[in-house]
Image: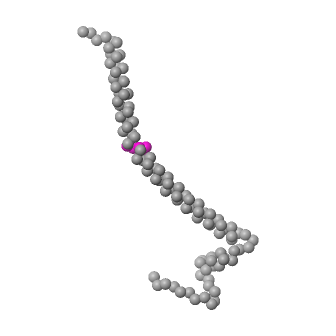
Amino acid sequence: MRIQIRDYQTLGRRIITMFLGLGLPLYLLFHLFTGERSWSALLNRGEEYKQKTNYIDELAEKNRIIAKKLQLLQNSHVDQDLLEELARKNLGLIYPNEIILKEKE
């Protein structure tokens, strides 16, 4: 019984078909559940995205508040309430008839 070249070609095609039919799906399934691009990592990235979006929103709000205060200080007239608040906070100024109460720490 002789094996002909045609039999080797058929055997080779079967091996390749078996590899592609079983090996490739197993490879893809393995990488679907493990690694930095896996399904669980993708879900974690969604959480990370939400956290960073919230942080950016907080920073944008703080930026808006600071820009508004800066605008009040840059106009030709200074907002008296803001000026008084800054003088009390930064310079420790008070009116002569005010009484300061401090809590013990």
21 on left or right of 61: left
| Magenta stretch secondary structure, dominant | loop
Whether 103 is drawn above or below 40: the answer is below
Side of 35 relative to 68 (left or right): left
Outermost residue toward the top in this view: 1
Point out residue 78 in the picture as x, y percentages from the top left corner: 71, 74
Q: Quadrant of residue 36?
A: top left
**Residue 35, magenta (yes or no):** yes
18 vs 77, nearest the viewer: 18
* Residue depicted at x 45% and y 82%: 105
**As drawn, which residue projects farthest toward the right?**
76
- Give residue 75's position: percent from left, percent from top: 73, 69
* Residue in the image at 36% along x and 24% along y: 17
Return the x and y of residue 81 as percentages of the image width and height: 66, 77
- Seen in the picture, residue 35 relative to 17 is either above or below; the reply is below
Q: Relative to 13, does residue 46 appear above or below in the rendering? A: below
Q: Residue furthest bottom?
A: 97
- Above or below residue 20? Residue 74 is below
Magenta-drawn stretch contains 39:
no
Q: Which colour scheme is used?
A: one colour
Q: In which quarter of the image is the N terminus?
A: top left
Q: In this view, does 5 lie to the left or right of 72?
A: left
Number of labels in the image equals 0
> Magenta stretch?
34-38
Kindly indicate the quadrant of the structure image that contains residue 10. Answer: top left
Residue at the (56%, 59%) spot, across then down = 57
